[in-house]
Image (cartoon, rainbow, N blue to C red):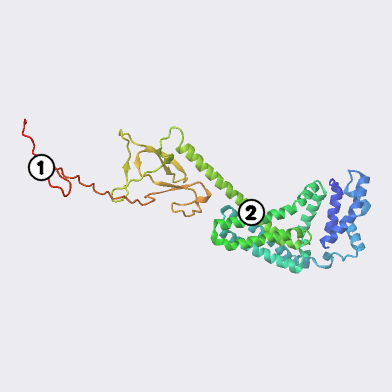
């Protein structure tokens, strides 16, 4: 059937699928493939304006036509005819719990994957263990009882009918294109999981034991991904790992963009705010000096002093401080009083410890004190000059007899 199948034909096929929903999915696809040629022939004869009533006149209702196909293929009657409504509803409780537990587990894994990717902190991933536990319980049920009971749920049948209609309608080409990208997707998932694990280990080396887990997960999705089309039970492996890839990948992308933006903003601020045209600054060689510390002869730091040049002019530079409301650095004026409080930028405090709160916004903190110790060299006293020789005498070399010269009388 072409991708432009009329609405009446799609509706007829969907009702046939619903009437055969208790059969294995492979059997349903085989039956539908046998029905398609006849529907194509009828719709071509009736033209593009064919209506559902026309198909019912030629083939009967979709339900009766499905019953004929069921009898012709020696399939058992629908299970709904054999069970009372109450028993049928009670029998759906456990499959429904398995289905929606699986969906909830995928959402939990994706959420904590995003949190771990945006912070690169391994302990965030521990929250995903709850989702994995629910997925494991659901997968155990599917492995033991198969997918027939899950596929017979009304919500699953409605979703499958919707997807089938989309494939047979205008979205057929899009679904076909996405299907052709599956091999590349599984490979991309494997690579992303390896990079995710490597980034976390490089950020926190104490979690090195976690990297083999990511390695096993990458190998599992590369192996199970291509096989999940034929064995749908493997989707209990591929879909949670895909959710982790999507969540963690988006989180890591946000982490990188945040680091780049903060670094660019900080450099731009320093370039325009502190070194812009008309702003005074201290220079030591080719580097700008923001603070000056002074010590006395005993090596004790001076808590307050003022700088002047040789002409008595104050050496004043801009003073900066942190706004208590916003945590952002701002200019507070210009003076020549030193030392200044030290301003610490970004997600680390003045002792190099990671500050998780400040990691999510551009912020600063101030701290007093001298960040180093100074060893003041002791000044040695200058040697005393030699005493002058007595007037009228000269010294001779060692071992030679002393010689005396008499000064001439005045006027002589």
- Examine the image and state in which quarter residue 78 appears: bottom right
Look at 82% across and 60% down and name the residue there: 25
Foreground pick, 404 / 129: 404
Left or right, residue 114 beside residue 152: left
Look at 71% across and 58% down and name the residue there: 222
Q: Earlier in the sequence, mark 2 or mark 1?
A: 2
Q: Quadrant of the C terminus?
A: top left
**Residue 81: percent from left, percent from top:** 84, 65
**Residue 36: percent from left, percent from top:** 89, 53
Q: Is residue 402 above or below residue 143?
A: above
- Examine the image and state in which quarter residue 150 appears: bottom right
Mark 1 element type: loop
Residue ID for mark 2: 247
Q: How many marks?
A: 2
**Residue 157: percent from left, percent from top:** 78, 58
Foreground pick, 274 / 300: 300
Q: CA distance from mark 2 to mark 1?
A: 106 Å
Q: Is residue 375 visible?
A: yes
Foreground pick, 332 / 49: 332
Look at 66% across and 53% down and name the residue there: 246
Left or right, residue 269 beside residue 46: left
Q: Is residue 408 above or below residue 243?
A: above
Residue ID for mark 1: 404
Left or right, residue 260 beside residue 223: left
Report the disc number at residue 237: none
Q: Is residue 21 visible?
A: no
């Amino acid at each position: 059937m072409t991708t432009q199948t009329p609405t009446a034909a799609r509706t007829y096929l969907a009702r046939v699928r619903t009437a055969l929903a208790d059969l294995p999915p492979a059997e349903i696809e085989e039956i539908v493939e046998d029905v398609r040629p006849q529907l194509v022939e009828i719709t071509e004869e009736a033209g593009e304006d064919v209506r559902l009533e026309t198909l019912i006149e030629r083939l009967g209702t979709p339900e009766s036509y499905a019953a004929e196909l069921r009898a012709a293929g020696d399939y058992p009657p629908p299970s709904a005819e054999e069970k009372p409504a109450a028993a049928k509803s009670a029998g759906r409780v456990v499959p429904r719990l398995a289905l929606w537990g699986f969906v909830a587990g995928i959402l939990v894994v994706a959420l904590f994957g995003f949190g771990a990717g945006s912070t690169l902190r391994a302990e965030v991933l521990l929250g995903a263990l709850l989702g994995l536990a629910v997925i494991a319980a659901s997968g155990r049920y599917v492995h033991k009882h198969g997918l027939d009971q899950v596929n017979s749920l009304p919500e699953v049948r409605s979703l499958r009918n919707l997807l089938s209609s989309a494939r047979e309608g205008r979205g057929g080409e899009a679904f076909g294109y996405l299907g052709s990208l599956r091999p590349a997707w599984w490979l991309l998932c494997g690579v992303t999981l390896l990079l995710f694990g490597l980034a976390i280990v490089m950020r926190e080396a104490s979690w090195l034991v976690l990297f083999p887990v990511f390695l096993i997960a990458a190998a599992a999705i590369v192996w199970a991904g291509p096989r999940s089309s034929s064995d749908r039970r493997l989707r209990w492996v591929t879909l949670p790992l895909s959710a982790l890839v999507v969540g963690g990948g988006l989180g890591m992308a946000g982490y990188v963009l945040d680091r780049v933006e903060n670094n660019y903003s900080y450099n731009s601020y320093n370039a325009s705010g502190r070194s812009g045209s008309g702003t005074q600054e201290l220079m030591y060689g080719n580097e700008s000096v923001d603070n000056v510390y002074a010590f006395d002869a005993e090596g004790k730091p001076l808590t307050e002093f003022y700088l002047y040049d040789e002409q008595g002019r104050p050496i004043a530079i801009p003073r900066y401080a942190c706004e208590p409301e916003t945590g952002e650095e701002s200019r507070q004026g210009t003076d020549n009083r030193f030392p200044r409080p030290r301003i610490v930028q970004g997600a680390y405090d003045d002792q190099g410890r990671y500050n998780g709160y400040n990691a999510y916004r551009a912020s600063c903190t101030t701290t007093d004190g001298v960040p180093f110790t100074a060893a003041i060299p002791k000044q040695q006293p200058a040697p005393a000059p030699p005493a002058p020789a007595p007037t009228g005498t000269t010294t001779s070399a060692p071992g030679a007899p002393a010689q005396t010269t008499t000064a001439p009388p005045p006027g002589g």
